[in-house]
Image (cartoon, rainbow, N blue to C red):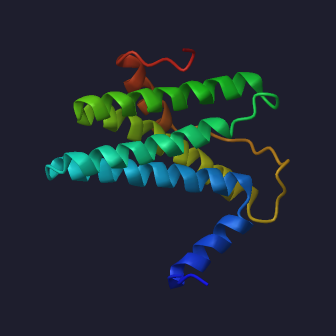
Amino acid sequence: MAYQRPGDSYFETQILTATPQKLRLMLIDGALTYARWAAEHWQHGRIYEGGEAIAGCQNIVTELLRGLRPEEAPELVGKVAALYNFVFGSLIEAGLKRDALKLNDAVTVLEIERETWRQVCEQLGSSLDDDARPQLRRSPHFLQHVDDLASRGFSADA
């Protein structure tokens, strides 16, 4: 039997017992962690480590895209897919040019998405099943970020 750090079994239990909504939130948290690591590595001149962190973030964004179910809400899923594709493209550009602005664009969208899923998890609570459909409210903070991205050429309709 392999050695397990004390936190490993706790984390494994969290994953195995999480709702799909909570799993999505955990993935977004992971993507944000990798993106922030990339920025920190680049800031300290650790180019290789920054690139590895970008790759980790891209892997998670790929999983987020693969987890979308267009058969359930095609129009909404199309818009969410456009957001994730924007994030992925921003990560590619950030990685190729070590562009902090492009990395920040990706982080901004991921933070908005994280807040959305945090609200979903909060509204559903731990006792609701996967078929519950919460009514989400977008905050003015969200709209401001969407306007900022739109002014730089981003469109969710792409």
* Residue sitting at the far front: 1
Q: Which one is nearer the viewer's eye here, 71 or 124? A: 71
Q: Which one is nearer the viewer's eye here, 9 or 154? A: 9
Left/right placement of residue 42 relative to residue 95 reads left
Tell me residue 52's x, y (percent): 34, 48
Residue appearing at x 60%, y 41% in the figure: 64
Tell me residue 50's x, y (percent): 27, 47
Q: Is residue 39 visible?
A: no
> How many numbered marks are there?
0
Residue appearing at x 27%, y 51% in the figure: 49
- The C terminus lies in quadrant: top right
Tell me residue 133's x, y (percent): 80, 44
Left/right placement of residue 148 relative to residue 124 reads left
Left/right placement of residue 17 relative to residue 155 reads right
Residue appearing at x 66%, y 65% in the figure: 15
Left/right placement of residue 111 relative to residue 79 reads left
- Relative to residue 141, is residue 39 depicted above or below? below
- Relative to residue 145, is residue 123 depicted above or below? below
- Residue 124 lies in quadrant: bottom right
Residue appearing at x 84%, y 56% in the figure: 129
Q: Which one is nearer the viewer's eye here, 130 or 59? A: 59
- Relative to residue 106, is residue 12 depicted above or below? below
- The N terminus lies in quadrant: bottom right
- Relative to residue 10, is residue 19 depicted above or below? above
Q: Is residue 66 visible?
A: yes
Tell me residue 126's x, y (percent): 75, 65
